[in-house]
Structure formats: structure tokens, C-alpha cells
Image (spheres, rainbow, N blue to C red):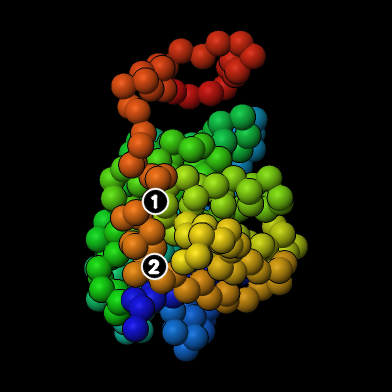
């Protein structure tokens, strides 16, 4: 039998800044995911505060908002560690993370034994908008997650990160086989096309959970990288795409199939030419791409 890892996309609408209600709702969705056979449950972006951000132009809003930030070793994450241990299911829980200075937009991946496997903070914050009040992350991490199907290399990126090829690329270069992506924005044809491309060009499985309508438009989605069948015929790499409503949507990733694909096909790191890519590391920005609010 194939080694299947089931990722549950927890497509929900948040209860505003009511952290207790968000925690309770998230737990209920996790329990439903377990009954459906999930190995990993994935939350939408910054779930504990329902992706609420203050207006950067209104400093008086910022202090009360920062008080909602939580630590990775605090009660919220510990609650989901206990739940992961109880359900024997990995949970990728998202939150506004308490940090020196401004908070971070973070996800902690908890393994099925309740241990923290990875904590990642969003690198590509939307600095032209409300996310200017956040501290950006500074690296992309990959962990080995123990699952019922065996160990799998998992990385994370958050929302706007997925619009940069470099995010998924560095995760692939660090060994990721599966990339988890919490999200909080409209998912329309262009963003979905970008996300499908991240799977294809890096030969990784990708899974993304968005907020349900009316908060966002749902369409949580997962793609396999395996683009051709055994006879060389092109195939649709879509695993699952939700509608707009709340629900738990299960994405089954066939690890054996993905690994066989990675061993023989031409994408990923097989035929890259890094010696030609020096300009990718340049911090210089030329017109028309100069943006005064961008943080390097």
C-alpha cells in the first residue's frame, strides 16, 4: 500500500478577537479532522486573533492589539500540544506571536506526540499595508515530521510568502517534500495558479488553508507535484479545492508517488544552474520596483 499523508484544511471564519472562542472552534475542527482520518490539521493564518491587524496610521490601536500576542510556549500552543497528543495527530496552529518589539505572524507545527517540530514566522510581510506593524521572520525552516505513514520532510510558508518563488525554492533545497501554507486573503485564479506552480517547479506537495466566507472567500487548496501519469500523459495536479463555506477538507498526499517523481523528473534541483543566479542575492532594487515602505 502507498504511504498516504492526509492534511486537513481547517477552513473557518474566526470569532474576531475572542481568543477563547477561536481556540474552542479550532479544537472542534481538529477533532472533526481526526474522525476523517487526518494526519495533519492546518489552520488559516494568525488564527488566535482572526487575522486582525491595527491600522499603522493609528498608533492608539497598536498597544491593545499587541496585548493579544501569545508566546510559543504559552497556554494557546500548550493547549494544542495536549490536543495533538490526545488525538495522535499533528497540528499546525497559527497565531500572533509575542516577540521583542513588534509581534510576528507565526505557525507552530506540533507533532502527533505533542512536541513542537517547527515554528516559522512570515518572512514576506505585506509592508505596504497593515502588516507593516509586524516583525518579519528571517528564515525558512524544514523539519522531519513523524506520521503514521513514516517520516516526512515538512516546511511552512504563510500567505504572501507563496507569491515569491524563492520561498518554496529554499524550502525545497532544504529537503521539504510537503509545504504547509496558512492563508488570509482572497484566493482567485492568479494566486491559485501561483500556488500550483510552486508545487510543480519544486516537486513538492503544497497545502493551503484560507478563511471561509464572508471573512475571505475560502477555496483552501492542495496540489500534488506529479504532473504526468505512468504513460506520460499530462494530468491535473489538483488534490482538493474547497468552496467558500466552512468545513474540513481532506487532502491525501501519496508520499511514495511524490518520492518516485522526485527521483526521476527534471524539475526541483536536478538541472538548476546556481552559478548564473548571483543577481538573485542582490539587495538592490531598481525602478519600477522601488517601494519606500519595503523592508529588506
User: Which residue lies at the image location 29% right of the left edge and 50% below the top edge?
Assistant: 175
Q: Does dot 1 land on a helix, a strand or a loop?
A: loop
| Residue 42 drawn at (x, y percent) | 47, 66
Determine which quarter of the picture holds residue 170: top left
User: Which residue lies at the image location 48% right of the left edge and 24% below the top edge?
Assistant: 295
Is 124 left or right of 60, judged from the image as shown? left
| Residue 205 drawn at (x, y percent) | 44, 59
User: Which residue lies at the image location 71% right of the left edge and 50% below the top edge?
Assistant: 189
How many C-alpha atoms fall within 10 Å of the one at disc 1: few (<14), some, or many (≥20)? few
**Sequence-wise, which precedes: disc 1 or disc 2?**
2
Q: Farthest bottom residue?
A: 35
Q: How many marks?
A: 2
- Foreground pick, 228 / 175: 228
The N terminus sits in image quarter: bottom left
The label on residue 265 is: 1
- Foreground pick, 202 / 248: 202
Q: Farthest right residue?
A: 214
Q: Is residue 1 above or below residue 258?
A: below
* Label 2 sits on residue: 257
Determine which quarter of the picture holds residue 4: bottom left
How many C-alpha atoms fall within 10 Å of the one at disc 2: few (<14), some, or many (≥20)? some
Amino acid at each position: 500500500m502507498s504511504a498516504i499523508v492526509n492534511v486537513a484544511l481547517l477552513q473557518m471564519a474566526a470569532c474576531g478577537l475572542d481568543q477563547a472562542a477561536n481556540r474552542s472552534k479550532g479544537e472542534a475542527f481538529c477533532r472533526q479532522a481526526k474522525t476523517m482520518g487526518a494526519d495533519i490539521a492546518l489552520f488559516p493564518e494568525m488564527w488566535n486573533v482572526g487575522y486582525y491587524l491595527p491600522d499603522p496610521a493609528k498608533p492608539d490601536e497598536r498597544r491593545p492589539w499587541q496585548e493579544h500576542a501569545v508566546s510559543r510556549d504559552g497556554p494557546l500552543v500548550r493547549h494544542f500540544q495536549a490536543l495533538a497528543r490526545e488525538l495522535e495527530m499533528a497540528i499546525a496552529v497559527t497565531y500572533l506571536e509575542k516577540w521583542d518589539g513588534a509581534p510576528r505572524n507565526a505557525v507552530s507545527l506540533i507533532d502527533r506526540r505533542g512536541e513542537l517540530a517547527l515554528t516559522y514566522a512570515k518572512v514576506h510581510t505585506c509592508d505596504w499595508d497593515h502588516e507593516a506593524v509586524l516583525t518579519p521572520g528571517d528564515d525558512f525552516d524544514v523539519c522531519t515530521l513523524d506520521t503514521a505513514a513514516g517520516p516526512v520532510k515538512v516546511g511552512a510558508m504563510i500567505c504572501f510568502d507563496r507569491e515569491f518563488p524563492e520561498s518554496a525554492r529554499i524550502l525545497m533545497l532544504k529537503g521539504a517534500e510537503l509545504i504547509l501554507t496558512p492563508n488570509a486573503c482572497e484566493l482567485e485564479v492568479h494566486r491559485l495558479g501561483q500556488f500550483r506552480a510552486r508545487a510543480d517547479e519544486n516537486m513538492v506537495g503544497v497545502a493551503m488553508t484560507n478563511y471561509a466566507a464572508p471573512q475571505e472567500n475560502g477555496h483552501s487548496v492542495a496540489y500534488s507535484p506529479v504532473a504526468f501519469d505512468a504513460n506520460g500523459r499530462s494530468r491535473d495536479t489538483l488534490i482538493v479545492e474547497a468552496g467558500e463555506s466552512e468545513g474540513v477538507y481532506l487532502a491525501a498526499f501519496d508520499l511514495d508517488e511524490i518520492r518516485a517523481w522526485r527521483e526521476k523528473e527534471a524539475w526541483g534541483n536536478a538541472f538548476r544552474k546556481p552559478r548564473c543566479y548571483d543577481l538573485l542575492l542582490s539587495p538592490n532594487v531598481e525602478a519600477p520596483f522601488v517601494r519606500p515602505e519595503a523592508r529588506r
